[in-house]
Image: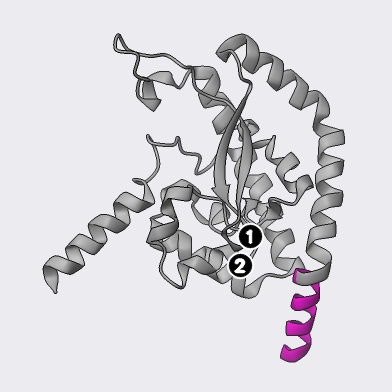
Amino acid sequence: MKEEEKVNKGIYRRILKRPMDFILSLMAIFVLSPVLIVVAILVRLKLGSPVLFKQKRPGLNEKIFTMYKFRTMTDQRDENGELLSDEKRLTKFGRLLRSTSLDELPEVFNILKGDMSLVGPRPLAVSYLPYYNSVEKQRHNVRPGLTGLAQVNGRNSIDWDRKFKYDYDYVKDISFILDIKIIIKTVGKVLNRKDIGVAGIDKPENFHEYRKKEMETEGFNS
């Protein structure tokens, strides 16, 4: 039975997962198009242009792609022309978009294009790449996801080590049943607005800073 499960997981991962992502993302764009249009208009009116926030992220096999999200911050600057802190630029409307995960909706186009999957490890910053160990790097053996195992088990309320453990567990045990469970749990999290954090404000420090401190501590103790 275990051998049969391995075969089924392999078939799903190599053959079925991408077509399923394509079909579901296409359906989501069609069904959610009114929401996408309304949110885009509100972002333009309340936060200005551009409506979309674009950022480079590493995807499958560490290939860099451009990820799309609705912008949630203003371009407010100080007297020297420098951008203000995230906390000061994040408006009430921006917080609402994040707390409802509406800012993530444009990522369905990334899924349609094949940059991302519906379920997988969340795509993180390109600057983190040099700091992953051999186990953490395995998160890039699959397409990054709109949601993932770490997101339904604490999201921004858990530390980096636990996040990467969930990512590794997902890559190792990826299956149709697991994806369905994660999608169902994600819907519940979004409806309850649980474990939503604000970049640079509510979540743990940036990973590369965390890893640098960890390396410095290990060097000091060695």
Range covered by the magenta-colored residues: 1-13
Q: Earlier in the sequence, mark 1 or mark 2?
A: 1
Residue 185 at x, y percent in the picture = 65, 53
Give the secondary structure at mark 2. helix
Q: Nearer the viewer, residue 82 or 17?
A: 82
Residue drawn at x 49%, y 52% is 154
Q: Nearer the viewer, residue 208 or 170?
A: 208
**Crowding near pointer 1: few (<14 within 10 Å), some, many (20+)?**
some
Give the prevailing secondary structure in the magenta stretch.
Answer: helix
In the image, is residue 135 part of the stretch drawn in magenta?
A: no
- Residues at badges 1 and 2 in contact (C-beta under 8 Å)? yes
Numbered tag placed on residue 141 in the rendering: 2
Direction from residue 99 to residue 29 in the image, left or right: right
Residue drawn at x 40%, y 42% is 203
User: How busy is the neighbourhood of tag 2: few (under 14 within 10 Å), some, or many (20 plus)?
Assistant: some
Residue 133 in the image, given as x and y percentages of width and height:
41, 69
Q: Position of residue 9 (x, y in %)?
A: 75, 76
Under tag 1, what secondary structure?
Answer: helix
Mark 1 vs mark 2, CA separation in Å: 6 Å
Q: Residue at x 66, y 58 (%)?
A: 143
Q: Position of residue 171 (x, y in %)?
A: 61, 69
| Residue 53 visible here | yes
Q: Quadrant of residue 90?
A: top left
Q: As rendered, which of 178 and 200 lies closer to the eye?
A: 200
Q: Which residue is the site of mark 1?
A: 60
